[in-house]
Image (cartoon, helix red, strand yellow):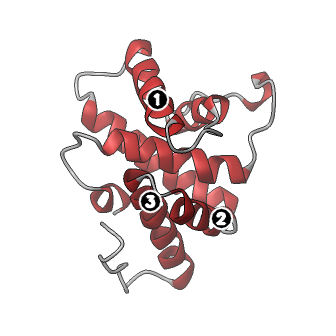
Amino acid sequence: MNSLTPVPTDLPPPARALVAAVRDAVRAAQARDDGAFAAASTRLAALDPEQVRLVLGSVVRSLLEERHPDGLDADDVQAALEGCVRSASGWLPSVDADALVVVVTGALGVHDPERTERLVTATEIAVSAPLLVATLLDGALRPVAAHLA
């Protein structure tokens, strides 16, 4: 789903806004367009944080499962995180590795907020998760729209 692909109209308005914001943030991250990314991630951060975490976590998990159909191990997770930081740091120097770890561990259902050194905000999730999704989409079998569905 790119920025020209319409958001499905059969979704309720809050879901349409969420899908559009995710789509736009991922698209901007893929294009390394810091202005468009800032605008889209700001829109995303303004939405219901729990819904944003749920949707982005599902997309990240779906992409990880697609990329590693035989199972995911710690080296695979580390490679995904390093690839994301390496890719994003060239155009977005404020990329937050700690927030990316929370995105991945949350997506995999192993995040323990009580063992986290600092709280990762909804805004940090709205920035970090689309960056990770954009990285995981490189070489993915299906576009982001399929993972959002």
Q: Which residue is mark 2?
A: 42
Residue 55, horizontal then vertical, whole percent? 50, 56
**Foreground disc of the pair 3, 2:** 3
Q: Quadrant of the C terminus?
A: bottom left
For residue 10, above or below residue 77:
below
- Whether residue 147 sits left or right of residue 36 in the image: it is left
In the rendered image, which quarter is residue 106 located in?
top right
Closer mark to the observer between disc 2 and disc 1: 1
Q: Which residue is mark 3?
A: 28
- Quarter of the rendering occupied by the N terminus: bottom left
Q: How would you rate the neighbour count of disc 2 (Cα within 10 Å): few for under 14, some for 14-19, many for 20 or more?
A: some
| SS class, disc 2 | helix
Q: Position of residue 7 (x, y in %)?
A: 37, 78
Question: Looking at the picture, which amino acid does disc 2 mark?
Answer: Thr
Task: Please report whichever mark, 2 or 1, sits nearer to the chain's N-terminal start.
Answer: 2
The reply, left or right, for residue 53 in relation to residue 122 is left
Q: On residue 86, which mark appears?
A: 1
Amino acid type, callout 3: Ala
Residue 113 in which image quadrant: top right
Tell me the amino acid under the disc marked 1.
Arg
Q: Is residue 50 above or below residue 68?
A: below
Front residue of this view, candidates 22 and 48? 22
Q: Which residue appears at 35% of the width and 39% of the height?
A: 136
Residue 129 position in % (x across, y down): 53, 46
Q: Would you say residue 57 is visible in this rendering? A: no
Query: Label 2, label 1: how many angstroms apart (C-alpha)?
Result: 22 Å
Measured along the vertical axis of the image, is residue 115 above or below residue 15? above
Whichever of labels 3 and 2 marks the residue nearer the N terminus, that label is 3
